Amino acid sequence: MNSKNSISLKKRVQEYLFITLGATIYGFATAILIDPNNIAPGGITGLAIVMNRLVNIGTGMWFLIMNIPILILAIWKFGIRFTISTIYATSVISWVTDLVGTYLADYVIHDIILGVTIGSAMSAVAMGIVFKNHATSGGTDVIIKILRIKYPHIKTGMLYLLTDVVVLIIAGIVFNDITAALYSFISVMVTSSVLDFVLYGRDGAKLLYIISDKPDIITARLLEELDIGVTHVFAQGAYSGEKKKVIMCAIKKRLSPLAEDIVRDEDPNAFMIVSSASEIFGEGYKSYFDERM
């Protein structure tokens, strides 16, 4: 095995160790803090908790059952290579959730405030660890990506909001408790905020400059898959004299890793500058006049 393959294998093993850690924390938070307090934090996890109340099968098992068709769809649409780490993360979350719920039942915390705050924050940190190691927890992420392909005119954020609202409405009906549904909504907000902080820090947005030999291919994928604005800046190399088409785009922080993945996929040798943008004004962002009124 050459050194390059050795480094690649070592990196992959390290990623799976972190995915295991993140998935374990997620399952623990669900079993100890979220599930016992009737909190349905959106997505497949929320649906699994609701289904557990309707049919007495473990929440973790429901999480896995509902992810199976979604993961099969993901393999069909995106290939096994891009789905295998998500299958692993989903399996660990399912197993840990039911294991902890069964054998550590005496340590369950029946406090909805702690569930909404600490439980949601732990889930967000766990998801951040999983996302940073090129995996997801399955479910909503896969569905949203497929819906965006079919309905490109609907914004990604709106699709996430719609799926979470549907889960919250179902939770309110099943629990027969509007208070539980409202706490679940707060949980979604806490998870979203903490996850943004874990993944992207305090920066409001990112500004990308990409110099590549494949600018048109990268641009097409950025426009189609991320629905962001892209500008071409024509430049010339000072040493080579070669003319280049530089890609410039301002991007919301949660989409920055996806843009970086696209560049990495299409041109691993691309030169890319990623900087923080504290404020962006214009279409899709803030209105200059509204902010200054």
Image (cartoon, grey):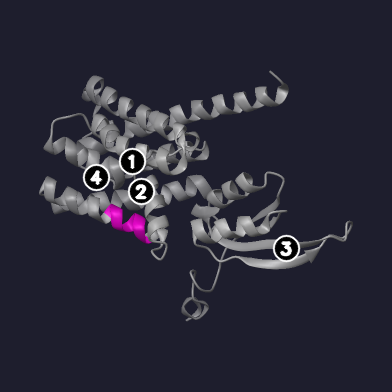
Mark 4 neighbour class, 10 Å CA radius: few under 14, some 14 to 19, many 20 or more: many
Of callouts 3 and 2, the N-terminal one: 2
Percent x, y of residue 138: 37, 40
Of callouts 1 and 4, the N-terminal one: 4
Looking at the magenta stretch, what is its main secondary structure?
helix
Residue tagged 4: 40
- Disc 4, SS: loop
Q: Label 4 is placed on what type of residue?
A: Ala
Q: Label 3 is placed on what type of residue?
A: Lys
Per the model, the C-alpha gap separating discs 4 and 2 is 18 Å
Q: Which residues are magenta?
A: 158-164
Magenta residue check for 206:
no
Residue tagged 3: 245
> In the image, 138: left or right of 15?
left
Mark 3 neighbour class, 10 Å CA radius: few under 14, some 14 to 19, many 20 or more: some
Q: Label 1 is placed on what type of residue?
A: Ile
> In the image, 126: left or right of 268?
left
Percent x, y of residue 114: 28, 41
Q: Which mark is residue 5?
A: none
Residue tagged 2: 143
Q: Residue at x 12, y 51 (%)?
A: 173
- Disc 3, SS: strand
Contact between marks 2 and 1 (CB within 8 A): the answer is yes
Percent x, y of residue 293: 47, 81
Per the model, the C-alpha gap separating discs 2 and 1 is 7 Å
